[in-house]
Image (tube, grey):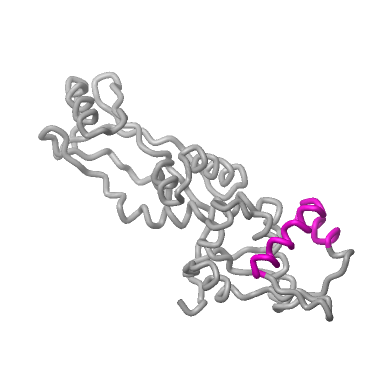
Amino acid sequence: MLGYTNIPASLCEYALVNQKINQLKLYIYLKINCSGEISYDVSSYGKWAKELSVSSRTIKNSLVWLIKNKWITVDSIQNTLRIISYKNLAIKLDLKFKTGFLFEPENYKYFKAMCCGVVITFYMGRKRYFNRQSGNIKGFAISKNCKKNDGFTPMPNNYLAKSLNVSTATAYRYKEQAENGGFIETKSNLNFVMNSKGEKITSDNYFAFILNHKEEGKPNTIRNHKKHLQEVDADLIHSFITLKKKNVGF
């Protein structure tokens, strides 16, 4: 019994998208508190409920689901529960457990927020590769004055939504929950639009930009800021979560 576990990022995603957070929380709790098998009786529900800050009914319902879906098997003679390994769970769910978050028990209170933060951090890592900000608009080779943002990375709600196959509103709620739990920090992102020479593009080009966005079916993110153009970009996010590689054989 280690007292901690490296929760796979894709398992956090599975629990969020399929609304199985309580089930995952109980699975993780049992996994941390045993070496694969744990004794239980009728008094266990109350104890687990108290430690996980949920009701006994939630524990019972979650356990029924875990047993039905074979994340846990029961030895009714010995009154023990066997918690299957991450490797077997990955095979069962057809998921890849390549990276995870080193979870410690004091985070049970903010377990869903933690899952949100893990998933956002995972997709932020993917997004960084595609985060070169450049383009051409009506003959302008432009860039944005992307100063260093002290570890903050742009993360559009629609990118997260598409990655998770959820609505944009749901993706926004995940970001909100992760921030309220203290796992990420967000701030607005407004940049001057620059030409290829590094000069701010003036406001008299505003309608050319608007027309180009309309022709390409893009939302209007250009703003007229006094004499120069600015672009509203995705919120910047800084994650306090560090993901680690998982050693599960694939």
- Number of numbered discs visible in the structure rendering: 0
x then y, percent, for residue 20: 63, 55
Magenta residues span 45-71
Where the C terminus falls, by quadrant?
Answer: bottom left
Question: Does 69 appear in magenta?
Answer: yes
Where the N terminus falls, by quadrant?
Answer: bottom right
Q: Residue furthest left?
A: 139
x then y, percent, for residue 232: 35, 32
In the figure, 57 relative to 4: above or below?
above
**Left or right of residue 162: residue 180:** right
Q: Residue at x 57, y 47 (%)?
A: 178
- Name the foreground residue: 222 vs 48: 48
**Left or right of residue 183: residue 213:** left
- Name the foreground residue: 95 vs 222: 95
Q: Residue furthest front?
A: 68
In the figure, 36 relative to 57: above or below?
below
- Name the foreground residue: 153 vs 46: 46
In the figure, 219 relative to 182: above or below?
above
**Left or right of residue 238: residue 181:** right
Q: Residue at x 50, y 63 (%)?
A: 243
x then y, percent, for residue 134: 22, 44
Q: Quadrant of residue 78?
A: bottom right
Q: Residue at x 28, y 19 (%)?
A: 226
x then y, percent, for residue 15: 58, 56
Q: Residue at x 48, y 79 (%)?
A: 249
Question: Does 19 appear in magenta?
Answer: no
